[in-house]
Every structure is written in C-alpha cells, then in structure tokens.
Image: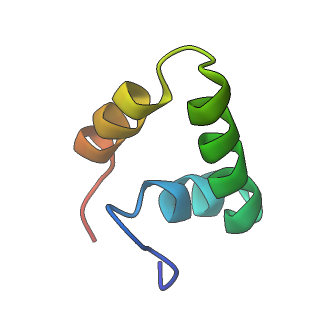
Amino acid sequence: MTQSKLLGVCAWLSERFNADVTLIRIIFVVATIVGVGSPILIYLILALVKPRD
C-alpha cells in the first residue's frame, strides 16, 4: 500500500477491490461535495475497520 495519503483508506479499498486508487479518491471527493450519504463518516469508520499493515 504505497499510495496511501491521509489514513490509507482509499489505497486499501483500491487494493481490496482491484480498482484504481485515483478513481476511489475522486468518488469520495465528489460524494463529499455533493453530499451523498455521509462520506466523511464512512471514511473515518473505514479507517478504524481496515487492518494495519
């Protein structure tokens, strides 16, 4: 997980689902701006749930 930026959630998700990390980050940013659901809360929960390296 060499592409982690803040808490490593997007890099972890991209590794887990074999997706592009940039696409995951864009989805989180757009969801935060548009206000779909609660992406910041989801991000923080995923940071607590993801395994440590």
Q: What residue is at 61 percent from the left and 45 percent from the top?
A: 29
Outermost residue, bottom direction? Answer: 2
Q: Where's residue 27, x and y in %?
A: 70, 43
Query: In the depicted view, which residue is nearer to us: 5 or 15?
Result: 5
Q: Where's residue 9, x and y in %?
A: 43, 54
Q: What residue is at 49 percent from the left and 59 percent from the top?
A: 12
Q: How many marks?
A: 0
Would residue 15 appear left or right of 41 to someone viewing this image?
right
Query: In the depicted view, which residue is nearer to us: 12 or 31?
Result: 31
In the rendered image of this protein, does residue 47 appear above or below residue 16?
Answer: above
In the rendered image of this protein, does residue 49 appear above or below residue 13?
Answer: above
Q: Where is the C terminus found, in terms of image quarters?
A: bottom left
Outermost residue, front direction? Answer: 33
In the rendered image of this protein, does residue 4 appear above or below residue 49?
Answer: below
Would residue 25 appear left or right of 47 to someone viewing this image?
right
Q: What residue is at 49 percent from the left and 29 percent from the top?
A: 39
Query: In the depicted view, which residue is nearer to us: 26 or 53?
Result: 26
Residue 44, located in which quarter of the rendered image? top left
In the rendered image of this protein, does residue 31 appear above or below residue 29?
Answer: above
Would residue 13 appear left or right of 22 to someone viewing this image?
left
Would residue 20 appear left or right of 49 to someone viewing this image?
right
Which coloring applies here? rainbow
Q: Where's residue 41, x and y in %?
A: 35, 26
